[in-house]
Structure formats: structure tokens, C-alpha cells
Amino acid sequence: MSFHSDLSKNRFGEIPPEVCMFAPLESLNLYHNCIKMIPEAIVNLQMLTYLNISRNQLSVLPKFLFNLPLRVLVVSNNKLVSVPDEIGKAKDLMELDISCNEIQVLPAQMGKLLALRELNIRRNCLQVLPDELSDLPLIRLDFSCNKITEIPPSYRKLSQLQHIVLDNNPMQSPPAQICLKGKIHIFKYLNMQACRLDKKPDSLDLPTLGKRCLPQQLTDSMEDFYPSKNHGPDSGIGSDNDQDPYDFIDPNPDEEAVLCEGDLQQNTALRVLHKGYTHSVIMMQRCMFTPS
């Protein structure tokens, strides 16, 4: 025999103490009341697996709430501004609805909810989706009506996801036109993004570049070799400086158009030497061509 209590649509300002003393209670519905806080006595309900306390006036979810064996927790339409880190203790939680609140950040500990199948975070103030959610066996994810601009590429690992609702967000990655096409196109995009990130080099592969033949007139950027590389402002690559470090050497139009690795190294060394002894060479040339 299971015990359920439906106290919805009353004017309770608090949870009746008698309810918290009824240990066999498995399901408690407090929908649409005026409850402002959850009493610590609720931990007496160690059989409670379902709690609906939506459309009340809660501003905080107490830490002790997650010591209960909850499988379904519905706290939508309240005044919550955060979710405590202790939510990670709710190992049995399968459905979480925290929609229609004022939550700004989701804790990384939500990634420990390894039984979670449905997550509704609709209509909050979220700007970022935590990477940790990608480890969950989610079947349904609703983060519509937030301020989210990007779905992390790691979300491609949500292999069991059947429904994703993301409308009314300023989406940039994936772009809105891809999001409108549905889940399959979204996941294709995330896979492409992940491949680009995996192939993106962290530094210049000089041995690889050395095997190439480089044109004598070097370009201002390395985009021909690393088109997706985003170099830092101090890397010196792709800069628009007006001064060429080797502009004191006039190019010889009769020279070959291509220098290989050895020629490139030799030419660089000659340029450095030339910088130090330009004046001496000019004087020597004047002496050689001065008529006797």
C-alpha cells in the first residue's frame, strides 16, 4: 500500500507539521499554495519519492531536501534564484522541474544526477549550460526562454536525448537556422564543432612546416597552414605592423620564387648578418668601383 497526500490549491502559508510526521508518505502534492519555506522536519519522510511544491513563494531550496529519496521534484513557478550544490546528493532523482524561476547559474554538481531523465529549466535567467550535464542520461531537455547563446559541443554525448526544446534563446552556436531544423541537425553541428576543436593546434608545428616549400615573400599570417587557429594578440602572427623586420633587404626579382627549408634558414642567417654589416659592405663596394 502506498500513501499519497494532495494538498494542492489551498492557502497554506507553510507545510502542515502533521504531514511531516507521517513517515510512510510517498507522494506529496503542495501545488498552488503560499508556502515560503520548507521545514527541516520534512527529512522525516524517508519514503517520499514525489514532491510537487510548484506555484508557491519559495526563494530557497534547503540543503536537507536532497537527503530524501526523491525521484520527482517539481518546484516550478517560485522565486528561486539558485540551486544548492547539495542537489548532487539526489542520486535517485529522475525528473527535475525548476522552470519559471529566476535562476542564473546551474551548479556543476548537477552532473552527478546519474538517474536524471527529464530536466526542465525553462524560463529562467540562465546564460550558460554547464558541460557537466552532458554526462547525464537525459531523454528530455527544455531550456527554452533563457539567455543562452551556445550549446556546448560536449552535449553531442547525450545519446539518449529524444526531445530538446530551446526556443526563445539568442542562439549563436548552433545558429538559429540550424536549431529550427531540429535535433538531428543540432547534433550534426555539435559533432562538427567538436571535430574542429580536436584538430585545432595549440602551437605551430615547426617540423611539419619545415618540410614544406615556402614562398620567398612570406605572407602576413599563417592562415594558409592553420586556417582555424586563433592566435593570441602577442603571438606576432597575423599582425598588421607597418615595419617589416627584414625590410632593409631589397628583394632580388631574379631570384627563384621558392625557398625550401635549407634555403630559408640560410637566407635568414644572411639577413641577420647583413643587418650588422650593411655599412661595411657599402664601403667595400664603393672602394671596388672607385676609378683608379
Image: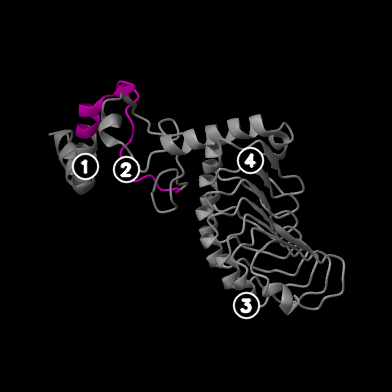
Q: Quadrant of residue 93?
A: bottom right
Distance of label 2 from label 3 (alpha carbons): 79 Å
Vertical position of residue 256 compared to residue 41: above or below? above
Distance of label 1 from label 3 (alpha carbons): 82 Å
Mark before the other along the chain sequence, 1 or 3 = 3
Residue 70 colored magenta? no
Q: Of residues 133 and 272, which is closer to you in this image?
A: 133
Secondary structure at numbered mark 1:
helix
Secondary structure at numbered mark 2:
loop
Q: Which residue is mark 1?
A: 274
Residue 242 colored magenta? yes
Q: Which residue is mark 4?
A: 139
Vertical position of residue 89 compared to residue 263: above or below? below
Q: Quadrant of residue 46?
A: bottom right
Name the side, left or right, on which 53 lies relative to 85: right
Measured as percent of width and height from the top left, residue 187 is found at: 60, 33
Q: Given this view, does label 4 or label 3 mark the residue nearer the observer?
A: 3
Which of the colour schemes (rainbow, by chain, secondary structure, one colour) is used? one colour
Mark before the other along the chain sequence, 1 or 4 = 4
- Quadrant containing the N terminus in the rendered view: bottom right
Asked if residue 59 shows in the view, the reply is no
Distance of label 2 from label 4 (alpha carbons): 65 Å
Q: Are marks 2 and 1 in contact (CB under 8 Å)?
A: yes
Distance of label 1 from label 4 (alpha carbons): 68 Å
Secondary structure at numbered mark 3:
helix
Q: Which mark is residue 40?
A: 3
Name the side, left or right, on which 268 lies relative to 154: left
The residue range painted magenta reads: 241-266
